[in-house]
Image (cartoon, rainbow, N blue to C red):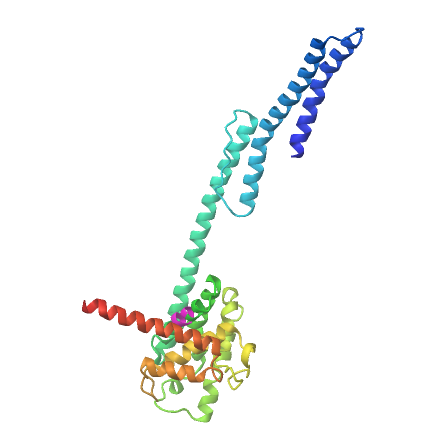
Amino acid sequence: MRLFRAILGLMLLSSAVPVAVLGALLATRAELDGLAIGAGAFSVALSVALSAWFARRLTRPVRACVAGALEIARGRFGREVPVQVRNEIGDLAYTFNHMSRELASYDAENHRLIAALERGYLDTLRSLAGAIDAKDPYTRGHSQRVADLSVEIGRELGLDGPQLRLLEYGGLLHDVGKIGVGEPILRKAGQLTEEEMAVMREHPVIGAEIVRGVEFLAGALPGIRSHHERWDGGGYPDQLAGEQIPLVARIVSAADVYDAMTSERPYQRPLPPATASEKVASMAGRQIDPRVAAALERVLQRRETGGAAGEREARA
């Protein structure tokens, strides 16, 4: 708008000069006839109209370029400006559009590389989780199942993409500290002694130390260290309670508890999903965050409904 006003002012000023000269010449006459006055007024009006039209025609492409630049600044790459004039401003618009297309191409390539890098991270984490589970034949596949269920619970709670990704990382690595626990304890077919349980209870701290310093896992670290904390404060290693426990840890904990109840273990037979679901409900407010327990219940109900529908389709 400032450029428009400046150009309009300059054009009005330049057109006012001949009008002023004409007025001065006419002023030397004793009397001005109506035709002369009308011609002067028409000249002024025409000058203003032409100046405004030309100034607007000149500044409209510039405004379009400015609007396009703001769109790119907001990350909307690929925006092009519709400038058809064949002058220096048209050349500027052509250059701007070319730059915008190149930025869109680079942005798409960056997204592709980031996605590939994240897939590589996830594949590495899955391999590591598989190696951990392989130490104990009774927990094979446990970490992946906990990760999958944690993501479902998080989605039920309305968490966004980055938070769901951290839940997946935390679920996959929640037992990574078991690398530091001896196989005789992990493979023991029966209840652990107090001394053995004390060793086992070190695995959340060991796991947190293993991943500490890995920047992209920083947000998942609470899910590793605190997944054995209890809502009532009776858990370990830090005896956190309620909202003190990070949400990622509360979700991973609920998924871990459910999968442990429904899996074959040396000291227990797997519970039917319905029985495990009832036990989860009874733990709400004591071991498990009530809000997380309710979300888990909804996920399990949806799984059961989906499974029943799938069976009916298969029979049909």
In this view, which residue lies farthest toward the front? 34
Classify residue 63 as left or right of residue 20: left
Spot occupied by residue 6 in the image (x, y as percentages of width and height)? 68, 29
Classify residue 8 as left or right of residue 78: right
Spot occupied by residue 88 in the image (x, y as percentages of width and height)? 56, 26
Spot occupied by residue 48 in the image (x, y as percentages of width and height)? 66, 22
Residue at x-position 31% and y-position 82%? 272
Residue at x-position 62% and y-position 26%? 55
- Is 21 in front, or is 276? 21
Q: Quarter holding the C terminus?
A: bottom left
Asked if the magenta segment contains residue 221, the reply would be: no
- Is 316 in front, or is 106? 316
Asked if the magenta segment contains residue 151, the reply would be: yes
Mark yes or no: residue 104 visible. yes
Q: Is residue 28 above or below residue 73?
A: above
Residue at x-position 65% and y-position 34%? 1
Classify residue 32 as left or right of residue 281: right
Q: How many numbered circles does the render carry?
A: 0
Mark yes or no: residue 175 visible. no
In this view, which residue lies farthest toward the bottom? 193
Spot occupied by residue 46 in the image (x, y as percentages of width and height)? 64, 18
- Main SS class of the magenta portion in the image: helix
- Residue 133's image quarter? bottom left
Residue at x-position 55% and y-position 25%? 87
Segment tinted magenta in the rendering: 147-152
Q: Is residue 191 above or below residue 174?
A: below
